[in-house]
Image: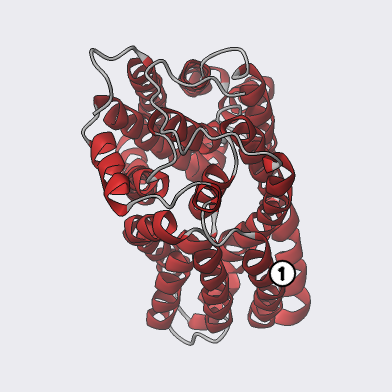
């Protein structure tokens, strides 16, 4: 079981042990593992496959087409807080079902766009659908449905399976695009997503958090009080700072790693292969971190992983000129690539309970998503100004170190009880 942080205060409703809860949670986790894998594959990863043919077909530049993805990320950020409030009030079934329907429609509309303006409009809708149907909503469902002892395993199971989304859908999309063109490929992917995700969300996701069915309904006043208490708590802002800064560093490495390795003298094929290790290590890192968190504080384990990433980023300009050195640095950085994804819900739910969890989590998601949208562009500007990736990697290293320090400070015993 994930060890809670030292100053945990868990509401009675959130700590209720429910007979048969483990059996009930399994179909929810299985369904979410499938829908998150397909959702990330269709709503996010396949974009890179269709980037070049889209730009050619729409008679515009790849940079202009890439801007659609930024619009999607910004729309996701804007929708985070209202969606979080809805999830707290009514549970995930309706929200995730509507989100998957909206995502299916948006991908179908994407297949029919004829200019960049239409593409941007479609991706704004796609961003809202992602906020409704992907990780943040799924995590809120898991936190509300399972007991504290089930939470770590459930989060790990969903993120491990979904971690293979790019491995499955990049070659699948490439094959469909090669044989049928990018427009028809999107139609096939949209229909596949809709036929699988919509019924799974409608049938397997609970309509209301489990505690609403077992205990009394959570009062709206109590929910607001829980959210206000979290937002007034010093530890919440330290956690927010940690995940915003770390998410920014991960986003920069995701976008720039291949170019960075090429600038260090490696051929493009090797750079792409080495960068692919990030996905493999993200799954490995999640498993190892969850195992260590059974004996140690989740915050302490996560902070240690962030420190390893800081060392790896700092070492890459020095050791990355050789293939062995580059692989070692990528592997070490990759161990923390997906750790923040499972640590964030565990820490927030452990510290503040499950009452108002989705709203509290969305307050972290909003600045984190905005930072992920902007920092790769800032890193590109820094690289152009410096002519080398060394200062970019120095900033990434410093960001990971700062994130680790923030987590360590957040885990320190507070002067008084939670508000």
Q: Which residue is mark 1?
A: 196
User: Which residue lies most toward the left here?
Assistant: 232
Q: Which colour style is shown? A: secondary structure
Q: Residue at x 63, y 81 (%)?
A: 183
Q: How many marks?
A: 1
Q: Is residue 103 visible?
A: yes
Residue 226 screen position, x and y as percent: 30, 40
Front residue of this view, candidates 243 and 149? 149
Q: With 141 as the anchor, is 383 left or right in this view?
A: left
Q: Residues within 10 Å of mark 1 (few under 14, many from 20)?
A: some
Front residue of this view, candidates 244 and 70? 244
**198, above or below 159, in the image:** below
The quadrant of the image that shows the N terminus is top right
Q: Is residue 267 visible?
A: no
Residue 40 screen position, x and y as percent: 60, 57
Q: With 74 as the anchor, is 296 left or right in this view?
A: right
Q: Residue at x 36, y 64 (%)?
A: 75
């Amino acid at each position: 079981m994930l060890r809670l942080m030292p100053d945990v205060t868990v509401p009675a409703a959130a700590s209720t042990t429910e007979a048969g809860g483990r059996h009930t949670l399994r179909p929810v986790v299985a369904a979410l593992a499938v829908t998150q894998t397909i959702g990330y594959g269709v709503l996010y990863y396949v974009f890179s496959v269709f980037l070049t043919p889209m730009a050619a077909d729409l008679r515009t530049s790849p940079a202009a087409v890439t801007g659609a993805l930024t619009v999607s990320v910004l729309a996701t950020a804007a929708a985070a807080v209202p969606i979080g409030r809805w999830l707290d009030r009514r549970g995930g079934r309706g929200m995730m079902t509507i989100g998957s329907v909206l995502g299916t429609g948006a991908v179908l509309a994407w297949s029919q766009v004829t200019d960049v303006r239409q593409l941007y409009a479609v991706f704004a809708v796609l961003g809202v659908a992602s906020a409704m149907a992907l990780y943040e909503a799924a995590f809120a469902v898991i936190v509300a449905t399972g007991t504290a002892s089930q939470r770590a395993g459930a989060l790990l199971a969903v993120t491990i399976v979904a971690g293979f989304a790019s491995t499955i859908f990049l070659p699948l999309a490439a094959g469909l695009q090669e044989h049928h063109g990018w427009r028809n490929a999107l139609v096939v992917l949209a229909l596949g997503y809709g036929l699988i995700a919509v019924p799974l969300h409608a049938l397997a996701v609970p309509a209301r958090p489990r505690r609403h069915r077992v205990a009394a309904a959570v009062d709206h006043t109590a929910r607001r009080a829980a959210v206000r208490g979290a937002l007034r708590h010093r530890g919440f802002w330290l956690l927010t700072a940690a995940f915003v800064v770390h998410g920014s560093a991960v986003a920069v490495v995701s976008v720039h790693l291949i170019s960075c390795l090429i600038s260090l003298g490696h051929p493009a094929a090797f750079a792409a292969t080495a960068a692919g290790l990030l996905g493999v290590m993200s799954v490995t890192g999640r498993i190892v971190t969850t195992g260590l968190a059974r004996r140690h504080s989740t915050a302490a384990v996560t902070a240690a992983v962030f420190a390893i990433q800081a060392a790896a980023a700092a070492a890459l300009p020095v050791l990355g000129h050789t293939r062995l050195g580059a692989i070692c640095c990528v592997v070490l950085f990759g161990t923390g690539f997906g750790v923040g994804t499972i640590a964030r819900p565990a820490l927030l739910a452990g510290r503040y309970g499950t009452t108002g969890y989705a709203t509290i989590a969305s307050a972290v998601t909003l600045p984190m998503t905005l930072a992920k949208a902007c920092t790769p562009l800032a890193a590109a500007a820094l690289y152009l100004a410096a002519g080398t990736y060394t200062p970019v990697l120095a900033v990434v290293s410093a960001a990971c170190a700062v994130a680790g320090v923030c987590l360590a400070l957040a885990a320190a015993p507070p002067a008084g009880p939670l508000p």
